[in-house]
Image: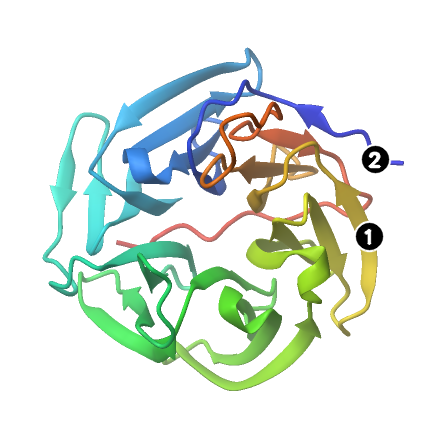
């Protein structure tokens, strides 16, 4: 039996995108539709909030210091007291960024979705260290969790509308995602797959929107763990702590009824049997 700890009060309207930042030993995540970045100091329990833009979808630490962030229609670079908005990737205000991660060479990938989740309107974009942006996948619907294996030869991916976890072969030299194959079919009755991360044995932990749980799937697709949460809409997860042994889970209040009394919007934490490994930083 895993003990799940509620780490914060319900601070976020739509909490998403957690990542451990080793430079200052903070767990950061976003309150997406408020445009804020939240930062937890696990040693004290104190959470700092920083407003960045109307929408902040995902973030990663930068090798040079600071953060790279996906904003509504593109990317930004953050310093301690600065926000550098890069050119918009697309002009359409009906589409926003949604979730992302860095590959082992430090290129930042982030996928989008239409605000109304219209099928086929989303894409996956890549920000290179030199600031160049390339669209690497199109025809998506709700581009969500993305995580590379420790070896860097494959990436797990979620387009939530498919109800699947897929795996791509990955060409590290070119950054090409290819040979997409279904790895896990998630029955709608147990929730919709959202954000994910991988542990040091290659297991995929995925948050299940409307499923009130996170599941672990082995590299061969077998479900090996179910951890229930006291909220209906967990959104994503990431390993953190000095040894990357704690799994942090974000959650959302978005779309819940006004009389919902759960701690939706809080941050949760538990310790799985298998630890994780550090998130790749952005090389730019």
Q: Quarter-wise, where is residue 121 in the image?
A: bottom left
Q: Secondary structure at mark 1?
A: strand
Residue 51 rendering spot, x and y as whole percentages? 25, 28
Residue 259 rendering spot, x and y as whole percentages? 55, 25
In the drawing, what numbered circle is on residue 225?
1
Residue 188 rendering spot, x and y as whole percentages? 66, 64
Residue 128 rendering spot, x and y as whole percentages? 26, 64
| Disc 1: CA contacts within 10 A as few (<14), some (14-19) or many (>=20) | some
Which residue position is annotated with label 2? 2
Task: Using the image as rendered, state which of residue 216 and residue 93 is in the foreground.
Answer: 93
Residue 103 visible here = no
Question: In this figure, what is the number of numbered marks?
Answer: 2
For the point 23% across and 50% down, which residue is it?
72
Q: Are marks 1 and 2 in contact (CB under 8 Å)?
A: yes
Q: Secondary structure at mark 2?
A: loop
Q: Is residue 231 left or right of residue 215?
A: left
Separation of disc 1 and disc 2 at Cα?
10 Å
């Amino acid at each position: 039996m895993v003990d799940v700890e509620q780490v914060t009060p319900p601070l976020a309207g739509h909490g998403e995108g957690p990542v451990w930042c080793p430079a200052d030993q903070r767990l950061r995540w976003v309150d997406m539709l408020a445009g804020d970045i939240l930062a937890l100091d696990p040693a004290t329990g104190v959470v700092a909030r920083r407003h960045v833009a109307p929408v902040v979808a995902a973030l990663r630490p930068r090798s040079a210091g600071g953060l790279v962030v996906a904003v509504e229609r593109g990317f930004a670079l953050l310093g301690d007291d600065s926000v550098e908005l890069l050119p918009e990737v697309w002009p359409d205000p009906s589409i926003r960024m949604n979730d992302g991660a860095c590959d082992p060479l430090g290129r930042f990938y982030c996928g989008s979705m239409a605000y109304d989740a219209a099928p086929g309107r989303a894409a996956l974009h890549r920000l290179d260290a030199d600031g160049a942006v390339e669209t690497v996948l199109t025809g998506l619907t709700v581009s969500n969790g993305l995580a590379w294996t420790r070896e860097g030869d494959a990436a797990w991916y979620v387009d939530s509308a498919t109800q699947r976890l897929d795996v791509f072969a990955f060409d590290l030299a070119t950054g090409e995602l290819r040979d997409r194959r279904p790895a896990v079919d998630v029955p709608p009755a147990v929730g919709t797959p959202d954000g994910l991360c991988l542990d040091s044995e290659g297991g995929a932990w995925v948050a299940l929107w409307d499923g009130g749980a996170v599941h672990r799937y082995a590299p061969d697709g077998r479900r090996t763990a179910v951890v229930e949460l006291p909220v209906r809409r967990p959104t994503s997860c990431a390993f953190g702590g000095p040894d990357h042994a704690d799994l942090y889970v974000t959650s959302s209040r978005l779309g819940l009824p006004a009389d919902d009394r759960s701690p939706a919007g809080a941050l949760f934490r538990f310790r799985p049997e298998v630890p994780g490994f550090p998130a790749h930083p952005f090389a730019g």
